[in-house]
Amino acid sequence: MSTQHGYFLIADITGYTAYLSQSELDHAQQTLTALLNLLIQHTQPPLIISRLAGDAVISYGLRDNFFQGQTFVEMIEDTYIAFRRAIDLMVLNTTCTCNACKNIKSLDLKFFVHYGAFGIQKLDRHDEMVGADVIVIHRLLKNHVTETTGCRAYALYTDAAIRQMGLEEICALMTKHEETYEHLGSVDVWIQDMHPVWLKKRDTARVTIPPTQVILEASTHIAAPPEVVWDYLLQPEHRIVLIGSDRMEVTDRKNGRVEVGSVFQCFHGDHPAPQTILEWHPFEQIITEDLISQLPIKNCFVFSAYRLEKTSEGTRLTQGIAQSRGPWLGQVIIKLVMNMMRKQFDHDLEKFKNHIENHLSRHGTYPETSRISEDAVGAAIAESLTEA
């Protein structure tokens, strides 16, 4: 058994034991089945599901084939948002008056993230992680976070995970916390309250571009899940392949994160061409407003939209260019120039697709999406019922 280095993630449903004790088991099982399947669907490569444990999904990802830090944080946030939406829909769509259905809204979700060394043992039909760092993350499931911080739904990152992913700036908005365990000593962790994440996403209005403003649009299929394609879109060293710029840097990060208001500063020779982010929906869509700096007429802008759609074999990436603002003559010129560049536009999109797929193939075997059988889900539910 060789030693691996990587990340551990546990997604654990909050309040399920109390929920079961107050609920009719048949409807409670239906609820847990739906929620576990949601968590499984959101555990995408490079994460690999190790196993289900009652009302929790345990997964891991190898260090040398992993997301950058912000993408991992956004993946956790995206999972939480999907979970909360599912809870809200269950509450909205049920007319059943049993306790199991009335108490669905009492359920919530928390995440535990750690980085360290581990081995993998094949046990029955799943990979069992073993090692001292595996013990750490499982011990962290029993903690004093809620009593100390008041957070019921949260993401807990160990200091080891924060440092390995380079999240020091991002964790400035988190709460530092310490847990102490027998034989382990103290463990420094950072707590992200997930409730504000949900409120922000729920209340954010989406920006849309009217079809009549679209000048160019093309799409391609990439053999990688949306989370991975998004990760490439975020990184300047890969993004320049799609944009066709000589170099690029990111400015105006918000507490270490690229988000609405941040700028992809592109350079075509000596010409800076900022792309300001207007819309930022991880794994779904980015919209930027781009300055066209090569024109003789100043202050001419276009919208660039990047839309990601999950398919059975990967991701469909659609890129569109639309009219934005600036002098009337400049907008006319932009439309003419863009139509002349249609073939180049298609070429750059295909080049980006090939770049991602080639880059992934050069960096070792990429894990397939974890497939968990209905029997495994049923066994986890049975385990949760026994523990309750």
Image: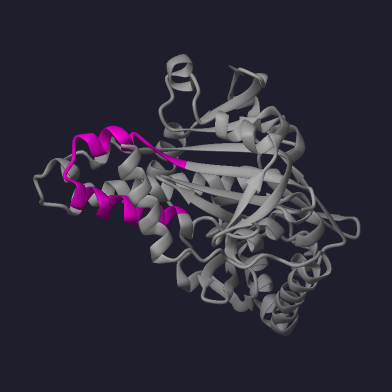
Report the front residue among 382 and 352.
382
Report the front residue among 31 and 127.
127
Residue 160 picture location, percent across and down = 72, 31
Which residue is rendered at x = 44% and y = 21% of the image? 146
Q: Residue furthest front?
A: 124
Q: How would you classify the magenta stretch by its main secondary structure? A: helix
Q: Is residue 300 above or below residue 140?
A: below
In reply to whether residue 140 is colored magenta, the answer given is: no
68 horizontally vs 48: left or right: right
Is residue 129 visible in the rendered image? The answer is: yes
309 horizontally vs 47: left or right: left
Report the front residue among 49 and 220.
49
Report the front residue among 16 and 316.
16
Is residue 73 visible in the rendered image? The answer is: no
Residue 174 picture location, percent across and down = 58, 26
Q: Quadrant of residue 375?
A: bottom left
Which residue is rendered at x = 69% and y = 35% of the image? 133
Q: Is residue 124 above or below residue 309?
A: above
Which residue is rendered at x = 62% and y = 78% of the image? 221
Residue 319 picture location, percent across and down = 61, 70
Is the C terminus in the top left, top right, bottom left or bottom right quadrant? top left
Tell me the magenta residue range: 12-39
